[in-house]
């Protein structure tokens, strides 16, 4: 699915109320026949609450890349990175935990407890405690919202890539003058009608790197085997763990 930027917003604060006002302004500009169905966002609680308040009933999908990045930062914080890099038993265990979002949501908590029973060190025990508190007991981030089972769009990396390209074009090592940023935003805005026409005509496609295409194919093959009853939940977890990118 090709994703293109359609709205730009400058914010001086990042409170729930601020996000809500941004969403309200965007909602007012949308045609009446357009109804928001799904939002793919990173794990910022204020954004989630604002979406829930402004668009009740909308499905909020957490970005799995940001999910695994959060776990990886905790691995580093707990001094587990060396063991992770050695690609032994600790590496395998941590990858299994990182692969939890790729399971059906109804089987994630049970699989977590199965993995938790295998913990034998204080560091891993602290890591699993973090996963439980942050991802199973958080008031905003429910398991069903960070499970990406059978989903083709699992990240907001297209948006992150757009931000990176914009920063690269600005080519600034310090604060960017606001007027220069406005000029760049104007250039982006002038491209939207052309992008819309190309999308409508089917002439604009998302570029898939070979490795990403292969990984996506492997994931859907594993999911199909699981749905057909050919592999167990544990086998599915192992198959998905090898396809995690950090």
Image (spheres, rainbow, N blue to C red):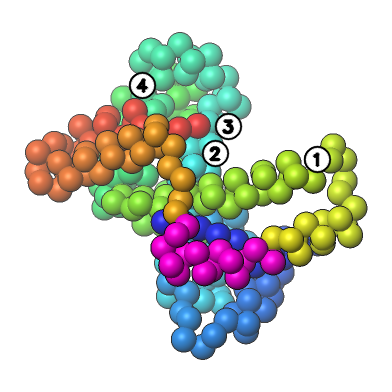
Q: Which residue is mark 2?
A: 70
Q: Is residue 193 left or right of residue 182?
A: left
Residue at far left of view: 229
Q: Secondary structure at mark 1?
A: loop
Q: Is residue 224 left or right of residue 113?
A: left
Quarter of the figure that contains the N terminus: bottom left
What secondary structure do most residues of the magenta stretch adopt?
Answer: helix
**Tag of residue 115:** none
For disc 4, the marked residue is 92
Q: Is residue 238 above or below residue 43?
A: above
Q: Quadrant of residue 98?
A: top left
Residue at horizontal 51 percent and vertical 76 percent from the top: 55
Q: Dot 1: few (<14), some (14–19), or many (≥20) neighbours within 10 Å?
A: few
Q: In the image, which is nearer the foreground, mark 3 or mark 1? A: 1
For the question of whether residue 165 can be seen, the reply is yes
Query: Which residues, given as a range, are shown in magenta?
Result: 189-204
- Residue denoted by label 1: 171
Q: Which class describes the residues within 10 Å of circle 2: few (<14), some (14-19), or many (20+)?
A: some
Q: CA distance from mark 2 to mark 4?
A: 18 Å
Of 219 and 204, the residue lying toward us = 204
**Of callouts 3 and 1, which one flags the residue occurring earlier in the amino acid sequence?**
3
Reading the image, the residue beneath label 3 is 73
Question: Upstream in the sequence, badge 1 or badge 2?
Answer: 2
What residue sits 49% from the left and 15% below the top?
85
Q: CA distance from mark 1 to mark 2?
A: 28 Å
Percent position (x, y) of residue 245?
45, 32
Q: Position of residue 212 (x, y in %)?
A: 40, 37
- Label 3 secondary element: helix
**Element at label 2:** helix
In the image, residue 101 above or below residue 26? above
Q: Nearer the viewer, mark 1 or mark 2?
A: 1
- The Cα atoms of the two marked residues, 4 and 1, are separated by 40 Å
């Amino acid at each position: 699915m090709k994703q293109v930027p359609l709205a730009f917003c400058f914010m001086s604060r990042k409170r729930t109320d601020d996000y809500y006002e941004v969403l309200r302004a965007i909602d007012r500009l949308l045609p009446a026949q357009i109804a928001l169905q799904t939002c793919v966002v990173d794990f910022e609680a204020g954004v989630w609450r604002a979406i829930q308040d402004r668009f009740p009933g909308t499905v909020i999908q957490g970005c799995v890349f940001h999910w695994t990045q959060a776990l990886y930062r905790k691995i580093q914080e707990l001094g587990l990175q060396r063991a992770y890099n050695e690609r032994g038993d600790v590496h395998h265990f941590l990858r299994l935990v990182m692969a939890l979002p790729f399971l059906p949501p109804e089987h994630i908590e049970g699989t977590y407890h199965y993995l938790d029973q295998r913990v034998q060190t204080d560091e891993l025990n602290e890591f699993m405690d973090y996963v439980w508190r942050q991802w199973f007991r958080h008031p905003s981030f429910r398991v069903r919202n960070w499970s990406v089972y059978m989903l083709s769009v699992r990240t907001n990396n297209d948006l992150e890539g757009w931000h990176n390209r914009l920063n690269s074009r600005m080519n600034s090592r310090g604060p960017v003058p606001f007027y220069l940023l406005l000029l760049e935003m104007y250039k982006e805005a002038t491209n939207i009608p052309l992008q819309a026409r190309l999308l409508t005509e089917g002439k604009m496609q998302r570029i898939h790197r070979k490795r990403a295409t292969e990984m996506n194919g492997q994931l859907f093959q594993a999911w199909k085997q699981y749905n057909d009853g050919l592999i167990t939940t544990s086998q599915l977890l192992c198959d998905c763990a090898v396809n995690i990118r950090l």
